[in-house]
Image: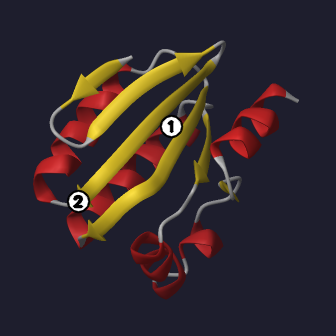
Amino acid sequence: MKKIGDNIIIDQQNNITIIQISDNLGYDTADDLRTAYNDVETSHILVDLGQVTITTSRGMATLLSIIVEGQEEERSFCLCNVSEPCMLIIDAMNIMDYIEGLEIVDTLEDGLTLFSA
């Protein structure tokens, strides 16, 4: 397990990298999220948004950017435990209409199961 900045923890289980974001997915966390993504060595990435209480457009833009980049690199992404602030933005921006193959599941365990199948 590795902590990056104040709000990001990166962990790996088998061939799945888990990026846990807490508190604020904002300006400072966006840079830490980019750093975390650059450390990922697996093809399956599970992003846990359950502890995010505040998000900004920059934070969400960085998240979407790494998802798009990852898909171009043939990585697969799954969002889990999506907090209400994040889901409001995902819905408002119709993100699911623009990013093919992005999965959203209820729990971390569901995400691990999805990638283990």
Compared with 108, 18 (above or below) is: above
Q: Nearer the viewer, residue 96 or 1?
A: 1
Q: Is residue 16 left or right of residue 2?
A: right
Badge 1 local density, few (<14 within 10 Å), some, or many (20+)? Answer: some
Name the mark nearer the viewer: 1 or 2: 2
Residue for point 34% across, 31% down: 9
Q: Which residue is mark 1?
A: 70
Q: Are marks 1 and 2 in contact (CB under 8 Å)?
A: no
Mark found first going from the N terminus, 1 or 2: 2
- Image quadrant of residue 4? top left
- Image quadrant of residue 113? top right
Give the numbered dot on residue 10.
none
Q: Which residue is mark 2?
A: 24
Residues under labels 1 and 2: Cα distance? 23 Å
The quarter of the image holding the C terminus is: top right
Residue for point 27% across, 69% down: 54
**Residue 87 in view here:** yes
Mark 1 belongs to which amino acid? Gly
Compared with 3, 100 (above or below) is: below
User: x, y (%) of residue 32?
Assistant: 20, 38
User: x, y (%) of residue 28?
Assistant: 11, 50
Compared with 115, 54 (above or below) is: below
Badge 2 local density, few (<14 within 10 Å), some, or many (20+)? Answer: some
Mark 2: secondary structure: strand
Residue for point 32% across, 25% down: 38
Q: Is residue 103 left or right of residue 41?
A: right
Mark 1: secondary structure: helix
Mark 2 belongs to which amino acid? Asn
| Image mark count | 2
